Image: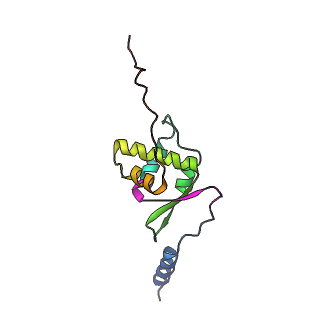
Amino acid sequence: MTDDGWDALLYAQVRAAPPTAEAPSPGLQQVGLRRSELDTLRRFLALRGRLRHAPAPGLESAVDAARFNAASNRWVVYVSGEQMESMARAFFLERLGGSAAPANRFARVYGVSYEPPPHDAGATATCG
């Protein structure tokens, strides 16, 4: 067998093996994301310095640590409850400017959705 053939077989074994990850810390929940949902979270995190409601602490490192699970065809992240709420807000923003699918699926599968606070109709801005 050639060196390239040997390396290709070795690479295929490693690629097919599920990633070995440390067990998540207590209190974290496993969340499976579609690629488009992971991309939504990355866009949300890229705006962290300009958003009025910043992403939850630790969400960026959780997203960076996402690992692909071929069996479920999902990117797996481990997040806290606060981070789940922040993810729901990201999917809410995606709903406003793009697709409602991530927010709907996240609410259906994980029971977490972001509901904006009610708008105070009595407080109107006046110029003058």
- Measured as percent of width and height from the top left, residue 52 is found at 49, 34
- The residue most toward the right is 26
Residue shown at the point (47%, 41%) measured from the top left: 47
User: Which stretch is magenta?
Assistant: 23-37
Residue 53 spot, x, y in % from top left: 51, 37
Q: Is residue 65 visible?
A: no
Q: Is residue 22 above or below residue 122?
A: below
58 drawn magenta: no
Q: Residue furthest left?
A: 98
Q: Is residue 27 magenta?
A: yes
- The C terminus - image quarter: top left
Residue at 47% across, 89% down: 1
Residue 30 falls in image quadrant: bottom right
Q: What residue is at 60 percent from the left and 56 percent from the top?
A: 28
Q: Residue furthest top?
A: 128
Position above or below: 125 against 77: above
What colouring does the structure picture have?
A: rainbow
58 sits left or right of 93 in the view: right
Asked whether residue 13 is in view, the answer is: yes
Residue 19 versus residue 37: which sits nearer the camera?
A: 37
Callout count:
0
- Between residues 88 and 42, which one lies in front from this camera angle? 88
Taking 53 as reference, is 126 left or right? left
Q: Position of residue 87 (x, y in %)?
A: 49, 48
Residue at 36 percent of width and 41 percent of height: 96
